[in-house]
Image (cartoon, rainbow, N blue to C red):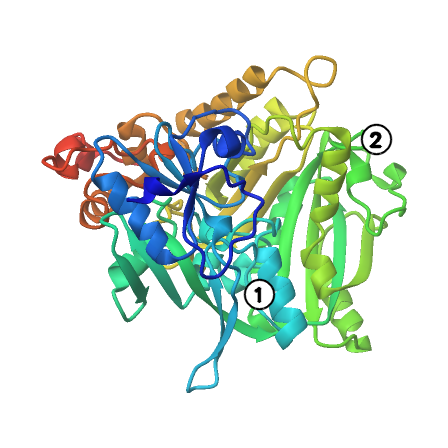
């Protein structure tokens, strides 16, 4: 069985393409597998498995099925924030150990795809596709050092999502190992229920070992622009206008963030200008500006830089109601633009905040309630900032396939609100982590008590009733899929949705019988 391959391999060792799977002893690999980027949870696994193939993943899952109470979690680059990729006393699959073989696939129709391992980083996919083939996927995350399988198991969003859809809407085929240890190849036409279950399925139905991603010709240049608003009403109206433009009138990327009206280098206006060194002139702000301001960020892609690109950007920007004089623009390369967050990581590593806890909170909030959220939370609880970005920008629900497992608000236009705290070490730097976690809870409580149409993105609940509320009318489908693809609830125990069950007990027997009637 798999545990026979116990050794002291480290996660940094590059696997040989034909190598046997290894299981790293906990004293060698525990440090990584027992923690994550969030730094809020620690869970010691029994062992860390370094699979060399999908068959090795299947072998690990089958081994767990034969051992009472043993669970399996797939771990990518360790960027979950609440222990979602951990397995206390179980097996952690180091998906980065899968060989990094990427392949260009050309369909009979001429369509081109990247066939990539689930443990590949999106950064690796970007550089391979652009440098070797002049091609690129359409949809990205802002931070590219996340794994393909990780983002497809959650959603995968960024400023491209309003136009091209999230990453779960930009995948043609998956290779998946389900909770019974069977390997499947699925798509919209072949085994579609499994395909859609796994997309946004929080790792509950299978481990993604490969994905086939559609490719298009990669742009070469990006016109990147930021503008500032003092009025949230104007900001939201312009952002929603931009994301609902027809394709020939639209930007390729629309995001935005809130920032504090101060010269604080992290929370205030120094975080706005591009390129570095540009000056933010606060005297241009209107007299009635409040403590929180807003930055709208847009980008237009092009194969080559042409003068009509600047003209088109100018025509679109002149219709917006931002504060004149507070606009910042740069022309950059496509890969440079997509890699822009790497500079944030570099700085966070230098100042120590990368290794500190990250009590992040990500929400989807309907356009219907976003102004009320701004008043109560951004201009209330968070008026001094969060020592990191406060993203807030709209997306369109019609870009998401309802067959996936992702839970979304009811509204057709909804906003991502991402409170991305980069904590300064306590004491002396910032408030204690427990205080920030409590603030997150207060924000969620405010959303619920005020009746906002919202969902938590990257949810972390402890009670099954909360999960039932999260999925709402789709909870029954989620439970049925779990029983179909992972009947012993072996997979992704760190999500705390279903308890591990003995072989004689079905999932339906451990799900609260009243949850089918739970409303959102």
Residue, disc 1: 245
Left or right of 230 in this view: 440: left
Mark 2 vs mark 1: in front? 2
At 37% across and 28% down in the image, what residue appears? 88
**Does residue 250 show up?**
no
Mark before the other along the chain sequence, 2 or 1: 1
Instruction: Give the Cα separation between the discs numbered 2 and 1.
Output: 35 Å
The quarter of the picture where residue 210 lies is: bottom left
The quarter of the picture where residue 163 lies is: bottom right
List the single residue furthest toward the left: 504
In this rendered view, identify the residue nearer to me: 53 or 34.
53
Would you place residue 382 above or below residue 151 in this image?
above
Q: Position of residue 482 (x, y in %)?
A: 23, 45
Would you place residue 90 above or below residue 59 in this image?
above
Q: Position of residue 331 (x, y in %)?
A: 80, 63
Quadrant where the image shows the N terminus: top left
List the single residue furthest toward the top: 427
Question: What element does badge 2 sit on?
Answer: loop
Quadrant where the image shows the C terminus: top left
Tag of residue 263: 2
Would you place residue 389 above or below residue 462 in this image?
below
Q: Position of residue 432 (x, y in %)?
A: 62, 15
In this rendered view, identify the residue nearer to me: 202 or 234.
202
| Proximity of marks 2 and 1: CB atoms separated by less than 8 Å | no
Tag of residue 47: none
At 49% across and 37% down in the image, what residue appears? 8
**Does residue 476 show up?**
yes
At 33% across and 39% down in the image, what residue appears? 3
Question: What element does badge 1 sit on?
Answer: loop
In this rendered view, identify the residue nearer to me: 221 or 353.
353
Q: Position of residue 387 (x, y in %)?
A: 69, 29
């Amino acid at each position: 069985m798999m545990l026979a391959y116990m050794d002291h391999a480290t996660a940094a060792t590059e696997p040989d393409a034909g190598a046997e799977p290894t299981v790293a002893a906990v004293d060698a690999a525990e440090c990584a597998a027992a923690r994550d980027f969030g730094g809020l949870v620690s869970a010691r696994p029994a062992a860390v498995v370094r699979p060399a193939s999908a068959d090795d993943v299947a072998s690990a899952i089958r081994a767990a099925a034969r051992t009472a109470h043993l669970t399996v979690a797939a771990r990518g680059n360790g960027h979950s924030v609440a222990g979602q990729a951990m397995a206390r006393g179980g097996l952690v699959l180091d998906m980065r150990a899968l060989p990094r073989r990427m392949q260009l696939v050309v369909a009979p129709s001429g369509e081109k795809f990247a066939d990539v391992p689930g443990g590949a980083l999106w950064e690796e996919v970007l550089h391979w596709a652009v440098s070797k083939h002049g091609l690129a996927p359409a949809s990205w995350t802002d931070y590219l050092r996340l794994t393909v399988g990780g983002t497809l198991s959650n959603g995968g969003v960024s400023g491209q999502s309003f136009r091209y859809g999230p990453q779960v809407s930009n995948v043609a085929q998956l290779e998946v190992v389900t909770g019974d240890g069977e390997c499947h190849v699925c798509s919209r036409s072949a085994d579609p229920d499994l395909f859609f279950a796994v997309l946004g399925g929080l790792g509950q139905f299978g481990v993604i070992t490969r994905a086939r991603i559609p490719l298009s010709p990669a742009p070469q240049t990006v016109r990147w622009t930021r503008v500032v608003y003092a009025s949230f009403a104007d900001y939201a109206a312009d952002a929603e206008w931009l994301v609902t433009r027809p394709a020939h009138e639209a930007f390729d990327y629309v995001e935005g963030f809130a920032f504090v009206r101060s010269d604080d280098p992290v929370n205030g206006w120094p975080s706005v200008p591009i390129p570095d060194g540009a000056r933010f002139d606060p005297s241009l702000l209107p007299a009635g500006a409040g403590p929180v301001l807003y930055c709208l960020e847009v980008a237009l892609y092009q194969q080559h830089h042409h003068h009509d690109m600047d003209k088109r950007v100018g025509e679109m920007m002149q219709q917006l109601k931002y504060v004149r004089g507070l606009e910042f623009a740069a022309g950059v390369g496509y890969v440079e633009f997509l890699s822009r967050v790497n500079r944030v990581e570099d700085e966070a590593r230098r100042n120590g905040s990368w290794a500190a806890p990250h009590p992040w909170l990500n929400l989807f909030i309907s356009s219907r309630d976003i102004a009320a959220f701004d008043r109560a939370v951004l201009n209330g609880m968070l008026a001094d900032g969060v020592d990191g970005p406060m993203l807030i920008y709209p997306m369109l629900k019609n870009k998401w396939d309802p067959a996936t497992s992702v839970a979304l608000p009811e509204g057709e236009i909804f906003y991502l609100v991402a409170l991305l705290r980069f904590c300064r070490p306590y004491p002396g730097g910032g408030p204690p982590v427990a205080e920030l976690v409590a603030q997150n809870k207060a924000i969620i409580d405010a959303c619920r008590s005020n009746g906002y149409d919202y969902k938590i993105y990257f949810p972390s609940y402890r009670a099954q009733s909360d999960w039932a509320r999260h999925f709402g009318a789709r909870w029954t489908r989620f439970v049925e899929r779990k029983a179909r693809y992972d009947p012993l609830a072996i997979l992704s125990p760190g999500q705390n949705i279903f308890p591990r069950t003995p072989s004689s007990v079905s999932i339906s027997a451990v799900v609260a019988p009243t949850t089918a009637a739970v409303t959102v």
